[in-house]
Image: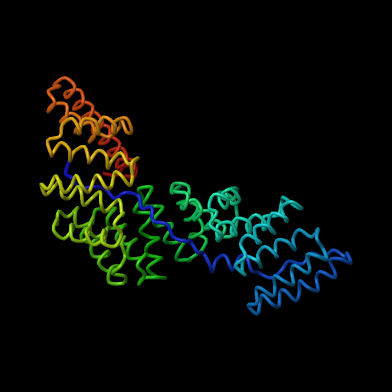
Amino acid sequence: MDGRPSRPRRWRRQAWALAAAIAALASGPPQTVERPQDARELARVFVERAEAALEAGRAADAVSLLEQAEREAPDWAELKVNLAAARSSAGDHAGAAAAARAALALDPTLDGARFNLGLALLKSGDAPGAAVALAPYADAPAPPAVHAALGLAWMQMERAADAAPVLQRSIDAGLRDPDTLLAAGRAWLQVGDPDRAAPVLTLLQAHARESVHTRLLAGDVADAREDWTRAADEYRAALELDSGSVEAQYSLGLALYKLRNYEEAAAALERALSLAAGHVPALHFLGLLELDRGNAARGADLLVRAAALAPDRADIARDLGRARLDLGDVDGALGILRRVISLDQEDPSAWFLLGRALKASGDGEGAREAFARSTELNQRLRERLERRVSGAKKPGGG
């Protein structure tokens, strides 16, 4: 136990735009179906005028014209697909979704309607709805923007393992939207594969090098590779771009913590908390830092605040149990650590701390059992890591 934490999953949220890619997919010229019906012939007059409006960048006018066309030919499913695209381009995502659903009600086989439905739902903030609409295309041919939108929806739902390959598929198809690249890099990091994140980062740097988010991802990739000096440099560069970035301050503090530069780490984490007093990760790791520096009372106060904000976080509760032990509150530590074990029975550190608490309470037998369980779990962890490293080697490699 060296006291250095691993990076927790980032949970910051942002509106995944995909603006250029979605516009390219959703605002193309209206389709024309060669069917000699009088209603459709009349509707085509409005469709052609709508196409001209779209080409001139007048999305609102195009919507009005397509709505007139729809009144002339209400059963024309393909027309509703184009109406959905035009409404989406005009910013009416609810209307776009309604038009796409109406098209699917007439013809459930229309991929374009499903594409537009998923994109409209994503842009309106309904990530689960977008994922349901687009999930059938995860392993099927579709425009790159559709795969990107599905991956972005899954990232918002914290399904990085599902998101990473589908985002990568859109990138391999040539999509270079910065939001997609950023999400793919984060997804690969969250599933523990920095080697897949690195080339995505390179692409992002080619398109948006001087971006706070690019610098943060670069720091995260370095952090995952345990190059904490490089990570700290990237986070400092992010702060040069935005001194008010809570994430950059926190990440810098964490990198410095891992470098055991406790004074500078504490200063960075304090700055993060001055910007966002309820930032749970900063509270957590500043609490740990204070414990490592022998300031158990200060550490306990910070961990109490973090635990109150995130009561289901077993790792924070575990470290609060450690703080109680450091303060000599054995009964308090036992209560906390037993609850931690009930939440996560596979945490070797929790079992080790429980062993310490039991030993301090005079329960020698219970302490030996807890230490044995901690040793067993640590051994399992080492074996899993060894298998992962071995499996990564080429056959016949040294």
Q: How many numbered dots are placed on residues in this image?
A: 0
Given the current orientation, which residue lies at the most extreme left position? 294
Q: Position of residue 183 (x, y in %)?
A: 43, 58
Q: Above or below — where is 133 with respect to 50?
A: above
Q: Residue at x 81, y 69 (%)?
A: 43
Which residue occupies the foreground of this view, 193 or 378? 378
Given the current orientation, which residue lies at the most extreme top position? 365
Is residue 330 toward the left or the right of residue 162 in the image? left
Q: Position of residue 287 (x, y in %)?
A: 20, 49
Which residue occupies the foreground of this view, 351 or 1? 351
Q: Position of residue 392 (x, y in %)?
A: 33, 44
Q: Residue at x 28, y 47 (%)?
A: 306
Q: How is the image coloured?
A: rainbow
Q: Position of residue 275 (x, y in %)?
A: 29, 62
Q: Residue at x 30, y 67 (%)?
A: 244
Tell me the quadrant of the picture where the N terminus can be found. Answer: top left
Quadrant of the rendered image containing residue 116: bottom right
Which residue occupies the foreground of this view, 72 or 24? 72
Quadrant of the rendered image containing residue 196: bottom left
Which residue occupies the foreground of this view, 73 or 266? 266
